[in-house]
Image (tube, helix red, strand yellow):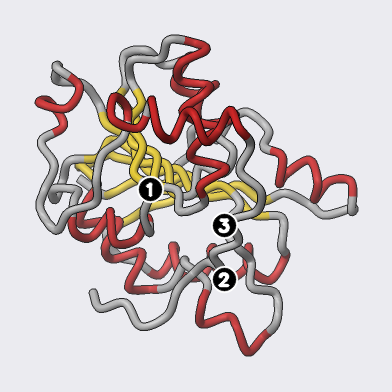
Amino acid sequence: MRRTVRSYVLRQGRVTAGQTRALAQLMPAYGIEFRDELLQPAAIFGRDAPLVLEIGSGMGETTARIAGERPDTDFIAAEVHSPGVGSLLQLIEKHQLKNIRVIRHDALEVLEHMIPDGALAGINLFFPDPWPKKRHHKRRLVQPAFAALVVRKLAPGGYLHAATDWEDYASQMAEVLAAEPGMRRAEDSAARPATKFELRGLKLGHKVHDFLFRRRA
């Protein structure tokens, strides 16, 4: 799967003193350097456990909460923005979370180059950049090639949980994921903690759409 366009804009924003400290001091302990080689999750976490990839973990609040609620599952959070990475590292330290590692890199390249085929119990994709202008829709992450890659990386029965508050992106997600023959719409609950992006959208009157698909056995 060759990358031709980015699905995000690198808006670094201001990095606080605490986030700067976390990036310097905690990244060696909880960070994973991007490399074009497959990870060995059991070696990273010191155990065999279900593995979930968080695509675009933002400022980390939702990722940290989910990881805290699911101590028997390991999480890899891929995020490009330094303030978000620093914030998540702070939360990992604050809550003594042993089941999260962070990669500061494009999540799609992480998925393609670092995650072994069939290794993931789940992928969380909460409120990706909606690229609202029609001419930018090609930059949206959820495309047929992405869906095919997801199927390859999920274990049989593994899930993709995607959420958006943009109506036309929700339509695109539904169409793309339903058209992927390796996935089926799941009937189980798509419960998750609310995110800052979600709350912002709700204040603007947006409707939130959740999609839960599973890889066919």
Answer with the quarter of the image where residue 100 lies.
Answer: top left
Residue 34 left/right relative to 6: left
**Label 1: which secondary element:** loop
Pointers 1 and 3 in contact (CB under 8 A)?
no
Kindly identify the amino acid type of the residue bearing the numbered disc 1.
Arg
Q: Which mark is residue 172?
A: 2
Mark 2 or mark 1: which comes first in sequence? 1
3D distance between C-alphas at marks 1 and 3:
16 Å
**For mark 3, does the 10 Å Cα neighbourhood hold few (<14), some (14 to 19), or many (20 or more) residues?**
many
Q: Position of residue 165 (x, y in %)?
A: 71, 55
Image quarter where the N terminus lies is: bottom left
Kindly identify the amino acid type of the residue bearing the numbered disc 2.
Gln
Q: Position of residue 169 (x, y in %)?
A: 63, 68
Foreground mark, 2 or 3? 3
**Label 3: which secondary element:** loop
Q: Residue at x 37, y 73 (%)?
A: 144
Answer with the quarter of the image where residue 107 lies.
Answer: bottom left
Mark 1 or mark 3: which comes first in sequence? 1
Residue to which mark 3 is pinned: 128
Above or below — where is 171 with respect to 17?
below
3D distance between C-alphas at marks 2 and 1:
27 Å
Q: Residue at x 49, y 33 (%)?
A: 188
Can residue 7 be seen by looking at this rendering? yes
Above or below — where is 48 with respect to 215?
above
**Label 2: which secondary element:** helix
Nearer-the-camera pick, 105 or 194:
105
Above or below — where is 81 with respect to 49?
below
Kindly identify the amino acid type of the residue bearing the numbered disc 3.
Pro
Q: Residue at x 47, y 67 (%)?
A: 141
Q: Which mark is residue 104?
A: 1
Q: Residue at x 49, y 29 (%)?
A: 21
Q: Which mark is residue 174?
A: none
